[in-house]
Image (tube, rainbow, N blue to C red):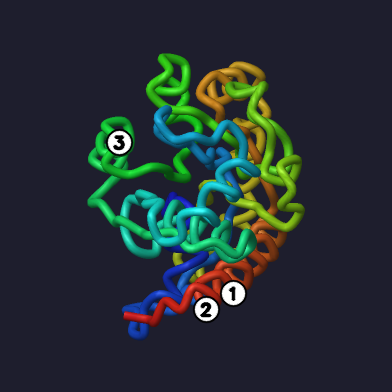
């Protein structure tokens, strides 16, 4: 069984010309596991305390606000590209090899903003080394309840969450897939499990294989449009 974050399932088809497998046929969906919203955070020295103020600042300084990501094609990269397109602003992408160095440079002021997972940025927010402006989910995050959503901030079509899913090799017997899906969903409904996930800003999901397949197809189509609009060419 494979457990994967959103990226490989939803963006690889659009980012790479040649894949050693076909995402649409190589796996049998089992269940969605959990999701955590991204959060738009800025260095505290940035003169913006809301998304609207950040947009205004970017329009006054085109090409002078840098955003970090964990790498080209990462959810952080694509979320910022989607935001820039929707806001009609010119931002500069600075790609890092992982969240650690990206957050280090964001906190030190080498870059000004980033879309990062709530669970990895919440402590920085708590200690004031990062300022949160908005979360990418439809509803507010339980660990950042005072931070508005991007929807509340004037971007009704914006959605950016890091989700996780389980899949089996294609051809796995349907009864085995169905059993795994039921057991996973049962575990995620356990109150203790749900509370542990909630404590780090992660929402348990659970789904049928059919629901997961539909969700992944919708995510692939949505991120494909973002990748195309951002002008990213398959590598």
Q: Secondary structure at mark 2?
A: helix
User: Which residue is most to the front?
Assistant: 60
Q: Residue at x 38, y 60 (%)?
A: 92
Where residue 99 appears, as percent x and y from the top left, is 31, 42
Q: Quadrant of residue 129?
A: top left
Q: Residue at x 66, y 19 (%)?
A: 191
Q: Residue at x 29, y 56 (%)?
A: 95
Label 1: how many Cα within 10 Å (few below 14, some 14–19, many 20+): some
Residue 143 can be seen, yes or no: yes
Where residue 80 appears, as percent x and y from the top left, is 49, 55
Q: Which mark is residue 109?
A: 3
Where residue 108 appears, as percent x and y from the top left, is 26, 32
* In the rendered image, the vertical position of residue 174 relative to residue 98, given as above or below: below
Label 3: how many Cα within 10 Å (few below 14, some 14–19, many 20+): some
User: Which residue is most to the bottom?
Assistant: 17
Q: Count of labels shown?
A: 3
Nearest to the observer: residue 91 or residue 120 = 91
Split into 4 quadrants, where in the image is the C terminus? bottom left
* In the rendered image, the vertical position of residue 88 relative to residue 75, given as above or below: below
The reply to whether callout 1 and callout 2 are in contact (CB within 8 Å) is yes
Q: Secondary structure at mark 3?
A: loop
Q: Which mark is residue 47?
A: none
Query: Mark 2 or mark 3, which has the lower sequence index?
Result: 3
Residue denoted by label 1: 225
Where residue 64 appears, as percent x and y from the top left, is 38, 55
Does 194 sit left or right of 121 as displayed? right
Residue denoted by label 2: 228
In front: label 1 or label 3: 3
* In the rendered image, the vertical position of residue 81 relative to residue 34, given as above or below: below
Does 143 sit left or right of 167 as displayed? right
């Amino acid at each position: 069984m494979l457990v994967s974050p959103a990226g490989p399932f939803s963006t690889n088809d659009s980012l790479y010309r040649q894949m050693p497998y076909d995402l649409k046929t190589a796996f049998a969906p089992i269940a969605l596991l959990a999701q955590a919203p991204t959060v738009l955070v800025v260095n505290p020295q940035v003169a913006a305390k809301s998304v609207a103020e950040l947009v205004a600042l970017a329009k006054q300084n085109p090409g002078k606000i840098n955003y970090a990501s964990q790498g080209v094609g990462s959810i952080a990269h694509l979320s910022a590209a989607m935001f820039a397109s929707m806001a009609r602003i010119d931002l500069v992408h600075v790609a890092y090899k992982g969240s650690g160095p990206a957050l280090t440079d964001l906190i030190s002021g080498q870059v000004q903003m980033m879309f990062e997972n709530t669970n990895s940025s919440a402590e920085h927010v708590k200690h004031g080394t990062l300022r949160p402006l908005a979360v990418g989910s439809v509803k507010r995050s339980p660990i950042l309840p005072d931070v508005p959503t991007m929807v509340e901030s004037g971007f009704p079509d914006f959605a950016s969450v890091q989700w996780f899913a389980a899949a089996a090799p294609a051809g796995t017997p349907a009864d085995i897939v169905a059993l795994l899906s039921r057991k996973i969903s049962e575990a995620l409904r356990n109150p203790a499990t749900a509370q542990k996930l909630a404590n780090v800003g992660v929402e348990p999901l659970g789904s049928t294989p059919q629901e997961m397949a539909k969700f992944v197809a919708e995510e692939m189509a949505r991120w494909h449009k973002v990748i195309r609009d951002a002008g990213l060419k398959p590598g």
